[in-house]
Image (cartoon, helix red, strand yellow):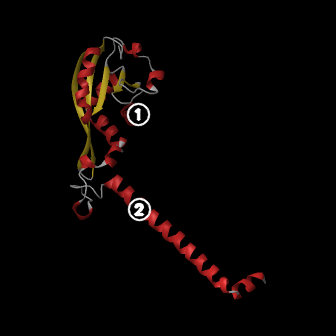
Amino acid sequence: QAQQWQMRSPNGGHFLSSRRWVNRWLKGSAIAIASLLLFVLLHITTGTLQKSGHYALLGGFVSPQDDPSTELIDIQQLRQGFAESPVLSEALQKSSFVFSNGYYISGIVAMAISPLTSTPITCLGEDMRGFMVWFQPEQWLGKDGLYITLERFQELTDSYRAYFQDIQEIGTVPIRRAGAVTEVFHVYWATKMVKPYPS
């Protein structure tokens, strides 16, 4: 009965129309947000905005080198690169440990190669985070390692030469999205660690 009285009052119709407006706004917002998320996810997985991509819309808008979404590396491709290369597979099995120059790179590598090997993975870099606790650098003395890094950090390879008898590149694993190479992992064989990192 009170609701009927409210509907007859001058503000009653306004209350109902504002309620409809809120419902439309909520539904419209949900559709817009879901559409934007779908579009972003499509770009991340297939490169819909990427220039020189197979699935590019209107020829693409951003080059793979300038696209921050390429930081989300497809670990399946990295795993496949190791599994399909006899040289990298053998090196992975023979090495006593695997390391990288960045904790996040070591995390990506760990997710990618853990189904292929039980070789321990660590980080030898300025910011080692949890790897400082999990492994002691002294435990790798006299052992061979596998150094895996991204193309943009290749110049850091020379900084590890003082810690090993020798470091030689043994292969690369390109990561592709929409047919274009978005990242390249470089793999090095590090022969016998001669002093702990950092010294």
Picture coordinates of residue 16, whole percent (x, y): 63, 80
Pick out the residue farthest to the right: 1
Q: Is residue 106 positioned above or below 11 on the image?
A: above
Q: Is residue 147 positioned above or below 66 on the image?
A: above
Which residue does the image show at 32% across and 39% down from the upper left?
78
Q: Can you identify the residue that label 1 sits on?
A: 107
Picture coordinates of residue 142, whole percent (x, y): 33, 11
Question: Could you tell me which secondary element the residue under label 2 belongs to?
Answer: helix
Sequence-first tag of 2 and 1:
2
Q: Can you identify the residue that label 2 sits on?
A: 36
Pick out the residue farthest to the bottom: 8
Residue 7 seen anywhere in this rendered image of the structure: yes
Q: Amino acid at mark 1?
A: Gly
- Foreground of the two, 8 or 118: 8
Residue 164 seen anywhere in this rendered image of the structure: no
For disc 2, the neighbor class at 10 Å (few under 14, some 14 to 19, many from 20) is few
- Foreground of the two, 18 or 57: 18
For the N terminus, which image quadrant? bottom right
Q: Amino acid at mark 2?
A: Leu
Instruction: Say if mark 2 contacts mark 1, CB within 8 Å.
Output: no
